[in-house]
Image: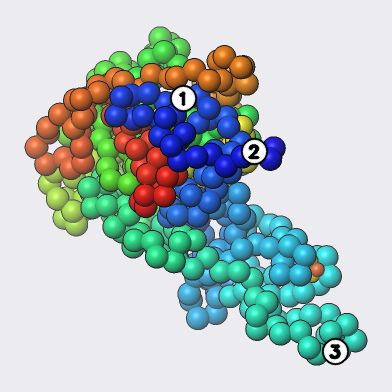
């Protein structure tokens, strides 16, 4: 990154004005703003790092990213989960270069220092000759992320020791929706297959704000899928958007009753096991959650601030997580993880998994449609004029939360609005100008 002067808070206020529906292009391209995001956004927010189904046994680990900081998420012998900076205390090399596995210890390849599953420095080669036994090993364990909390199997970490609890951060209103796939899953959600990883030349916020509730792009960007009949009429598929505290947002919320109708129709393609599965799922939601949640049955697509998006879920559609990891101001490393009900019939699991790859990921039809837009916007931002223009975020301004549907929590909006985008940037601006989260 270029050495640029620090961005003044007043300048940020000038560039980002959610209350007037105006965001300047520099917010997506200025290296100084990006540097500040790494400390003010990614070191202050709860970031998803793993799902507990990836860490069932002592010694299981996965690697993850918080902003650009690589971490190891490992389960140690006493069952607890550690989130450790994946950087050797000697010269900083990554001590773990696999995506996942099971191990007793992490060994740095450079000079061979070894660390335990909880990050303590265990071994230093040639301790006598090289260090005369004077090296304080206790003080040189891997740096720990101070806060690690889990919500029903979803593990998040936060560098801010004073952060509000994870459950408060996610908020009861959003969790009301989020609980439907988590609690409804008969055998619990589990990660299936490896996490797919690929890069995109785009600013990370373009992807996050899109998943936070940009229903407006679907007809144009993904229009071909509707024209060829791959999907039914979009306006009958989804009805509402909703936004929540701390910058989170969700779009594509179906009218209650609609999603279960679609799933019952889908089940006919598969046979009696699949039909029974849909009813059992629905019954479980009704028993453990509420009638209203059972009626909703499915949830839309959304974004947990800052960069964890999820892809809509239904009994025949896996619960996909998309993490938009920033890799510089103009690059994203996309991580796509697929979760599904471990007790769903095998043919349904196979179908849901195949659909996820077909629709999203590097080669999925919708993933490619969206990725191309994000990349071309980022390219446009290089221009002296095009990179400094204001963008319009005024759709539905002054009509925030004006839709009311009995029993659906959050600030509800119509299908087409930018209230969720503005909510995202309001929270972003608060953090960037140091007004807390
Ligand atoms: Fe890790 Fe030297 S850099 S042992
Ligand atoms: Fe899209």
Pointer 1 residue? 24
Please tell me whether residue 128 is drawn above or below residue 4 in the rendered image: below
> Left or right: where does residue 409 sit relative to residue 27?
left
One can see residue 92 in this view? yes
Q: Whereabouts is ligand 1, in terms of quadrant?
A: bottom right
| Mark 1 nearby-residue class (10 Å; few <14, some 14–19, many ≥20) | some
**Of pointers 3 and 2, the one earlier in the residue sequence:** 2
Q: Position of residue 160 (x, y in %)?
A: 45, 61
> Left or right: where does residue 390 sit relative to residue 233?
right
Q: Secondary structure at mark 3?
A: loop
User: What is the count of numbered marks?
Assistant: 3
Q: Secondary structure at mark 2?
A: loop
Pointer 2 residue? 4
**Label disc, if present, on residue 365 of the rendered structure:** none
* Between 10 and 356, the one nearer to me in the picture: 10
Q: Position of residue 55 (x, y in %)?
A: 51, 64
Q: Position of residue 274 (x, y in %)?
A: 32, 41
- Quarter where residue 124 is shown: bottom right
How far apart are the two marked residues, 1 and 2, measured between alpha carbons? Answer: 18 Å
> Left or right: where does residue 1 sit relative to residue 402?
right
**Label disc, if present, on residue 132 of the rendered structure:** 3
| Mark 2 nearby-residue class (10 Å; few <14, some 14–19, many ≥20) | few
**Of pointers 1 and 2, the one earlier in the residue sequence:** 2
Please tell me whether residue 143 is drawn above or below residue 428 in the rendered image: below
């Amino acid at each position: 990154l270029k050495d640029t002067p620090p961005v003044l808070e007043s300048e940020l206020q000038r560039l980002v004005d959610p209350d007037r529906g105006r965001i300047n292009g520099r917010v997506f391209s200025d290296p100084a703003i990006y540097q500040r995001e790494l400390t003010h956004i990614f070191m202050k927010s709860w970031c998803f790092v793993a799902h507990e189904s990836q860490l069932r046994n002592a010694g299981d680990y996965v690697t993850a990213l918080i902003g650009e900081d690589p971490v190891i998420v490992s389960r140690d012998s006493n069952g607890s989960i550690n989130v450790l900076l994946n950087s050797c205390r000697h010269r900083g090399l990554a001590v773990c270069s696999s995506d996942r596995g099971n191990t007793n210890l992490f060994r740095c390849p450079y000079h061979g220092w070894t660390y335990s599953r909880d990050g303590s420095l265990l071994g230093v080669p040639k301790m006598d000759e090289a260090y005369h036994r004077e090296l304080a090993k206790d003080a040189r364990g891997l740096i720990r992320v101070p806060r690690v909390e889990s919500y029903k199997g979803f593990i998040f970490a936060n560098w801010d020791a004073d952060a509000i609890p994870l459950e408060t951060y996610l908020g009861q209103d959003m969790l009301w929706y989020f609980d439907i796939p988590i609690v409804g899953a008969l055998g619990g959600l589990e990660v299936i297959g490896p996490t797919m990883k690929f890069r995109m030349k785009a600013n990370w916020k373009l992807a996050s704000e899109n998943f936070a509730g940009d229903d407006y792009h679907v007809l144009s960007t993904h229009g071909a899928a509707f024209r060829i009949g791959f999907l039914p009429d979009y306006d009958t598929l989804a009805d509402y958007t909703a936004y929540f505290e701390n910058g989170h947002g969700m779009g594509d919320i179906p009218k209650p009753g609609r999603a279960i109708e679609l799933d019952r129709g889908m089940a006919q393609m598969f046979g009696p096991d699949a039909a029974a599965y849909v009813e059992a799922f629905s019954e479980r939601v009704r028993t453990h959650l509420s009638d209203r949640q059972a009626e909703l049955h499915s949830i839309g697509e959304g974004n947990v601030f800052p960069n964890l998006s999820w892809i809509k879920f239904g009994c025949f559609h896996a619960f996909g997580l998309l993490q938009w990891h920033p890799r510089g101001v103009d690059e994203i490393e996309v991580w796509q993880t697929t979760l599904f009900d471990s007790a769903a019939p095998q043919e349904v699991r196979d179908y849901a998994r195949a659909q996820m790859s077909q629709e999203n990921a590097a080669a999925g039809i919708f993933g490619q449609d969206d990725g191309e837009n994000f990349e071309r916007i980022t390219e446009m931002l290089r221009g002296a004029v095009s990179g400094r223009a204001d963008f319009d975020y005024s759709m539905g301004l002054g009509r925030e939360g004006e839709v009311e549907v009995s029993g659906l929590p959050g600030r509800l909006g119509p299908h087409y609005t930018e209230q969720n985008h503005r909510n995202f940037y309001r929270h972003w601006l608060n953090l960037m100008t140091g007004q807390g989260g």
